[in-house]
Amino acid sequence: MSVDRGCASLGASDRLAATMSSLNKDREIVVESLIEERFTALAGEVKRRLESIKDKVSGDDSGLDNLWDEFSEQLAGQHSIFFGLQAQFVWDACEDVISDMGAFEVAILGTYSDGYLDWWTRNDVEPSMPMNSLESRQWVLDELHKRVVEEALKHREDILFHDQTEETFSRDQMLAAIKQRMQQLLMEDEANDWQATARWLDSLAIEKGVDLYVHYDSAWRWSSDFVDTMQHRVDFETLANGESVPDCLASFETAEELFYWILSPLHVPDR
């Protein structure tokens, strides 16, 4: 009978462990969701603050309504002499938003940032290893800034893709849309290293006999150079094959997919 009670106790222990494991996973999902909501709310607050600044850095003749629109346009296009100042306004707004944040919230948000992942990887962190509060605050600032930049890029993409009809999509607008989409996909690459992805795509182009004349200053510069190079080899106006250009570009989920679409032999004119 004692053996039976032991087996029963072991079975109960296993069930309890399985229950706790499932509970912990559910808790992790809930916490990650709350963290994501908090970062989204913080990015939204930065956006609102920048939208409230009506004194445009680029001047009143820019045709834009506020500093947020200016930053979004500059981020997605060629940087003017004003971009450094606009970018500093964004950093300042991010710092202001988290300035009154308590140490506990900073620590929690910090552990769900790319900065914490890098720190954890470099230090082979033990569970008891303390975090530096100044590092944690910088991690949160960097993570918030990254999300603000992503939101700004999405803002410009929405304007480009949804405020124009297919009838008004000129060839220049199509090329601009392709550049924009390539830049976005590079920045969203799961490896979180757009330059490595761009170099890999560059090597694939060489394998196909295409020499790309590209710069690696920024994801936008690379994307722009790539499209400018390919427009002399590819009939871009037939790429969409009758499909709406915005819908076609939005269907690509990775920079590689867009790259192969552009380099598809079906679209390369005979020489």
Image (tube, helix red, strand yellow):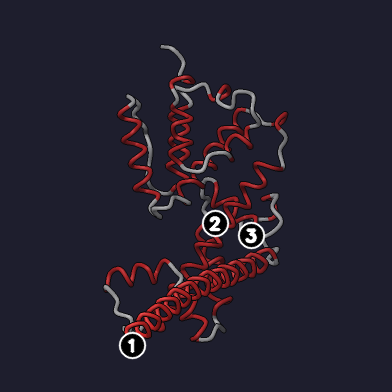
| Image mark for residue 68 | 3
Q: Residue at x 50, y 62 (%)?
A: 146
Up the image or down, 38 lies above or below 177; here it is below
Residue type of the residue flagged with mark 1: Ser
- CA separation in Å, label 1 and label 3: 73 Å
Up the image or down, 61 lies above or below 99; here it is above
- Report whether 161 appears left or right of 32: right
| Image mark for residue 2 | 1
Q: Is residue 131 visible?
A: no
Q: Between disc 1 and disc 2, whose residue precedes?
A: 1
Secondary structure of the residue carrying tag 2 is helix
Q: Which residue carries the number 2 mark?
A: 150
State the image quarter where residue 94 is shown: bottom right
Query: Which of the pair 12/230 is nearer the observer?
Result: 12
- CA separation in Å, label 1 and label 2: 63 Å
Query: Which of the pair 249/63 is nearer the observer?
Result: 249
